[in-house]
Amino acid sequence: MQSIWPGIPADNTRYIHPYTLKRGDENIRSLILAGGSGTRLWPLSRKHNPKQFLKLEDTSFFQNTLIRCLEVSDISEIFVVTNDSQRFFVTGQAKELGYDLPPENVLIEPEAKNTLPAISFGMREIVKRFGKSIVGVFSSDHVLDIRAMETIKNAQLLAKEHLVTFGIVPTSPHTGYGYIKPAEKIDAGYKVAEFREKPNHEDALKYLKEGCLWNSGMFLFDTEVFFGELKEHESSFYKAFGPEIDPDAAIEEIYEKVRAISIDYGIMEKSRNVVVVRLEHKWSDLGNFNAIYEESEKDDNGNVIYECENILINSQNNLVYSKCDKLVALIDVQNMAVVDTPDALLVCPRESSQKVKQVADALHSKNDERAYLQQTVYRPWGFYTVMEKSGRHKIKNITVDPKKKLSLQLHYHRSEHWIVVKGMATVQINDETFFLRQGESTFISAGMRHRLANEGKLPLEIIEVQLGECVDEDDIVRFDDEYGRVPHDNG
């Protein structure tokens, strides 16, 4: 299948090792927003493995955003706003590309309050680190042709005096995007006459005739211009995040002072100093499975097939994605999305895939684990895959990366049996520490403090069998954790 990441080689060879960017003296700093909840592409994405870290191909949405930012910024100049449960995805996926993202560049929001607080947080930290800067702001879960970064880089002069946003030249009367109406030309951009909400089909056709652009949600800001507009239009935000406040003020206290609001409503639609730059490049927010279908290469029958053995008889224009080791067969099926994961199956008309969030919300309301976790769950020490489970037992395949260890913890309602498949395990149970080799095992009763570690140079793989009245991930109490997770944070 042809890559949906335009301009990025399929084998990613260009980006395996860090390289030195050759730019002018004035670098762009990049701010990536990566705190999404992962509900629009359920069951592929979940709260603890959201869309931006999902890999439809060899690299994730976030990784491709990072690759694009490296066109205009050094790795030390890239900042990521995310939440505590996703910080290890950010650093881990950067490492997969061969980059060590500085830990201080990973900015943890105490709570999600939409894009204006997130961007204000990032701009504040960039000023603290670099002083006055030109900052590109990018969503972590969009598809964009990497060649667009040249246009973004060339908009720096505009950003010294204006708030710059980027509008995509439309390819269709899309009803899922907001629109920007440009006015008179200003250097490489256009004065923004009006921002418009997501339209119905008739209005979308009208907007295209007027020359309107899709609102991409990407920006280029001079920090002084940004904080000046913030002071004028959202004074409470300026008082909370502005350069005049205590640089050591706790971010938790700052977030308590501001409300949840998008940057569009907070600043962009109020300011008279906004310029839009046209991008004539492939772009999509891939907001649902129908959008993924539209952006993907089709076979002769209009079907998009990901990752699975299949037999499709008289079936056209379907999206089929399966991460399970099984045959997928469709007969007389048209225009459907079929998404199969080990613990959930989604079947719906492609045009109804925007309603998937309702399924995720229903699972959230029942506190069902399937809203939060997939079968394979990534942790700062490695990952595990749930192989089998019932109400009273669960079997996991656990991989611990070299020189990593789990927290010192106990469970009230379950016991655990560990069997080493590969490598050597360092095991602590209460006050005793010992080693387990391949084929050896140990048993941990409920209520015992225990810890698993890999002190070797190769990955450690074990099978864990849980037995008890409760085998949910929230039955965990931590006593020591080198990753800074709270005592009852799952995993």
Image (spheres, rainbow, N blue to C red):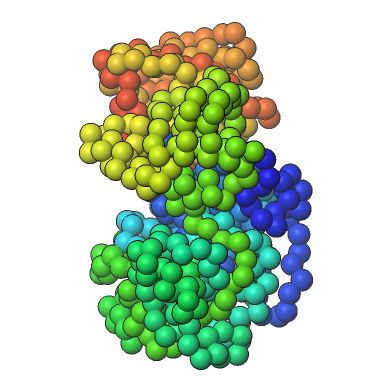
In front of the other: 34 or 6 = 6
Location of residue 17 with respect to 331 vertically, above or below: below
Q: Is residue 320 shown left or right of residue 6? A: left
Q: From the viewer's perspective, is residue 205 above or below residue 445?
A: below
Quarter of the image holding residue 480? Answer: top left
Does 225 appear above or below 450? below
Front residue of 198/244: it is 198
Report the residue at 74% width, 67% height from top.
21
Q: Quadrant of the N terminus?
A: top right
Q: Nearer the viewer, residue 80 or 248?
A: 80
Q: Position of residue 485 (x, y in %)?
A: 40, 42
On the image, which quarter does residue 364 sit in? top left
The reply to whether residue 54 is visible in this rendering is yes
Query: Furthest residue to the left?
Result: 365
Residue 148: where, in percent of width, then height?
64, 68
Position in image of residue 301 (x %, y %): 60, 37
Residue 488's image quarter?
Answer: top left
Q: Is residue 44 visible?
A: no
Q: Residue at x 53, y 68 (%)?
A: 170
| Residue at left offset 37%, top offset 44% | 352
Q: Is 18 rendered above or below residue 30?
A: above
How many discs mark residues in the rendered view?
0
Quadrant for the C terminus in the image: top left
Where is residue 433 shown, x and y percent of the image? 50, 19
Q: Is residue 14 left or right of residue 5?
A: right
Q: Residue at x 32, y 56 (%)?
A: 111
Identify which residue, 226 or 197, lies in the foreground: 197
